[in-house]
Image: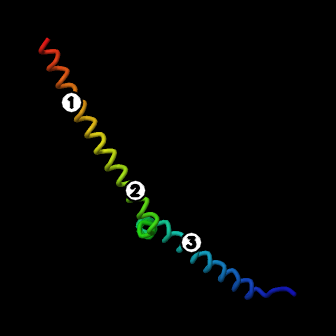
Amino acid sequence: MARSLDDIQADIDRTRAHLASTLDQLASKTKPEALVDDTKAQLTARVKDPQVQAILGVAGAVVVVGIIASLVRGSRKRSELKRLTQWLEDK
């Protein structure tokens, strides 16, 4: 059965409205502000996860231990250098 021109026009109008709505949704999702807000929300949700908090805690502790070890190593090197220069001056 053939469709009437009014039915075809109504389908075209519905499709056009749906397409316009889809384009509006895509445009709003790709705005930089929306992307930043979405990313913030995702990161906030991840940080609140107990597993992630534990991993971040361990990572932070490893960084602190590394910094302390580096400072101690540097202090020892300076101390050894002072002793060596003193020994060379004494000779």
Q: Residue furthest left?
A: 90
Q: Which corner quadrant of the image does residue 33 belong to?
A: bottom left
Amino acid carrying mark 2 in the image: Val
The relative height of residue 44 versus residue 15 in the rendered view (above or below) is above
User: Where is residue 90, by image quadrant?
Assistant: top left
Question: Would you say the residues marked 2 and 3 are in contact, meaning their CB atoms lie under 8 Å apart?
Answer: no
Q: Position of residue 20 (x, y in %)?
A: 58, 76
* Viewer-nearest residue: 90 or 31: 90
- The residue positioned 17% from the left and 15% from the top of the image is 88
Give the mark, 3 or 1, whose residue is nearer the N terminus. 3
Residue tagged 3 = 23
Answer with mark 2 or mark 3, whichever residue precedes in sequence. Answer: 3
User: For numbered disc 1, what is the local secondary structure?
Assistant: helix
Q: CA distance from mark 2 to mark 3?
A: 45 Å
At 76% from the left and 85% from the top, the residue drawn is 5
Describe the element under mark 2 as helix, strand or loop: helix
Position of the C terminus by quadrant? top left
Please tell me whether residue 58 is drawn above or below residue 7 in the rendered image: above
User: Which amino acid type corresponds to the residue marked 3 in the rendered image?
Assistant: Leu
Q: Answer above or below: position of 40 versus 87.
A: below
Query: Label 1: few (<14), some or many (≥20) within 10 Å?
Result: few
Residue under label 2 = 58
The x and y percentages for residue 79 are 19, 30
Which residue is located at x 61 percent, y 80 percent? 17
Q: Secondary structure at mark 3?
A: helix
Amino acid at pointer 1? Arg
- Residues tagged 1 and 2 counted as in contact (Cβ below 8 A): no
Determine the residue located farthest toward the right in the rendered image.
Answer: 1
Which label number is shown at residue 78? 1
Image spot of residue 84 (x, y percent): 20, 21
